[in-house]
Every structure is written in C-alpha cells, then in structure tokens.
Amino acid sequence: MSSDLTKLQPINHILHSVPIKLELNDSQYNTWSELFKIHCKAHDVLAHLTSETIPASSSSKAVEITQEVWERHDAIVLQWLYATISKELLRTIMEPDLTAMKAWNRLKSLFHDNKHTQALALMNQFINFKLDNFPNVSAYYEAIKNLADELADVDSKVSIENLVLQLVAGLNENYSNIATNINQMEKLLPFYDAKLILEETMKTRQAAMNHSATNSALISTTDLKENPNPSPLQRDGINYSRPLNGRGRGHNGSRGGRNNGRGRGG
C-alpha cells in the first residue's frame, strides 16, 4: 500500500469510477459494490473493506504502513463510500467513528436482507411489460433486458427462454402473426435474434404505411389538378349531387327529389 496520500483523491475521482448513486430500494447493489471494489483495488486500499486494523501481510511490503497512514486511508475510503450512496442510506448507516469496513458490511447486510422484497417487485414489473408502453421495439427490448439484469443483481436471474417468452407476451395485435410463429418454433430464438425479427416487422409495417400515405397524397393532388376550384361541399369530400339513401336532397319539392313521393300535380 502506498503511503503517498496525494494518490488517493477523496471525492471527484470516485464519482467517475463509480457512476452509480446507490439507493435504499435499488437493485444495483451488486454492480455498485463491484465498481467500488475495483476502484479500491486500483488504489491499493481494498484491505480497508475487510479489516479495521493493519493486515499482517502489509509488513512484507517495501513501504511500512503506520497507524496514522492506515487511519487516514480508511477515512478516505469512507468518504468514497459516502459519496456514492443516497442521503437515506447515509443516515441509515452513519455513526461516529465508523470504519470503512463496518460501513461496507452494513450496506451489504441491508441489501442482502432486502433481496427477496426487491425480487418480487422487479418480477411484477417484468411480467407486466407491454410494447404499447414504449415508443418502439428497441426501447421495449432494452427495458426488458435492463430489468432482467436488475433481477440477476438480486439473485433472481431470468433465463433466456423466459426473456424471449416475455418479449413476445407483451406484443400487441400488430405483431400477432410473428408472435405465433416464434412461440411455435421447436427451439426458441435467442433473445437478441427475436428483437431483430420484431424490428424488421416494424420497419415493414412502417414502409407499408408510408407507401399508403404517399398514394393518398398523389390521388388528392391529381383531384386538385382536375378540379382546381372545388366547391365547399366538394372540399369536404362529400358529393351532395348524388341522392342519399335513394332519395333526393329533401322533401317538399327540393331539387333532385319528388314532393312526398308524388309526381308534379299529384
């Protein structure tokens, strides 16, 4: 362990190495803890997460660690930890003269004890994902994948098969045919391949809609060229010159109709 304290940057550097603010009801504890340990290892202070005193093995190193150096390093590791957790968590674990190891273990206990509750909440979200709640297939796919990663963080890993089944289960009627085809396959597609097929289906549908819109615009333009000054009624798209329901425009001698079903002079 280096005795050069200038190499341990208290706050700024840790926020780049651990870009996660850990929350009490967060499912990213495993990711956060792994990033934090990597940062500590890179600065040769990982021992502060497992020991409150100078480890015996440190005596064999070239630079002898004094108690003063150890305590100052421990305080910096504790600052790193406090900087990457929420205020709620900080209030939960903080107490006077707390060591880095005690703070680390308290966080570990909090999240391990809360895993079952988090897993239930996340699984409820997972099984209720619907494509209609997202702007496109890609966003829908990413949301399912991210939630599956969060479930893995609380020891409730989702199998690839269940990922594909949930991806298909949340589709709307526009994808009913492709959903049926995927479900009927003898061997389910890999998760990413299923996403590609859905994206291709979406592109095909969008192209068909654009083609239809273009044709409608061309027809409207042609009609306007043939009749550049349409009457207000024609502009509304209604041809009132034709009888409605087999009758003229009205009764009592109005144009195009008869007077109450009788001829003139009836």
Image (cartoon, rainbow, N blue to C red):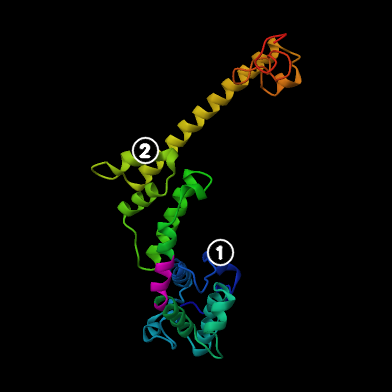
Q: Position of residue 170 (x, y in %)?
A: 42, 49
Q: Secondary structure at mark 1?
A: helix
Give left or right: position of 240 versus 46.
right
Q: Which quadrant is the C terminus positioned in?
A: top right
- Residue at the location (44% across, 87% down)? 52
Q: Position of residue 258 (x, y in %)?
A: 68, 14
* Residue 232 belongs to the span the image colors magenta: no
Q: Position of residue 262 (x, y in %)?
A: 66, 13
Residue under label 1: 16
* Residue 116 belongs to the span the image colors magenta: yes
In three-dimensional space, the C-alpha distance between marks 1 and 2, rounded to whole angstroms, equals 43 Å
Residue 149 or 260: which is nearer the viewer?
260
Q: Which residues are magenta?
A: 113-121
Q: Secondary structure at mark 2?
A: helix
Q: Nearer the viewer, mark 1 or mark 2?
A: 2
Magenta part mainly helix, strand or loop?
helix
Label disc, if present, on residue 62 of the rendered structure: none
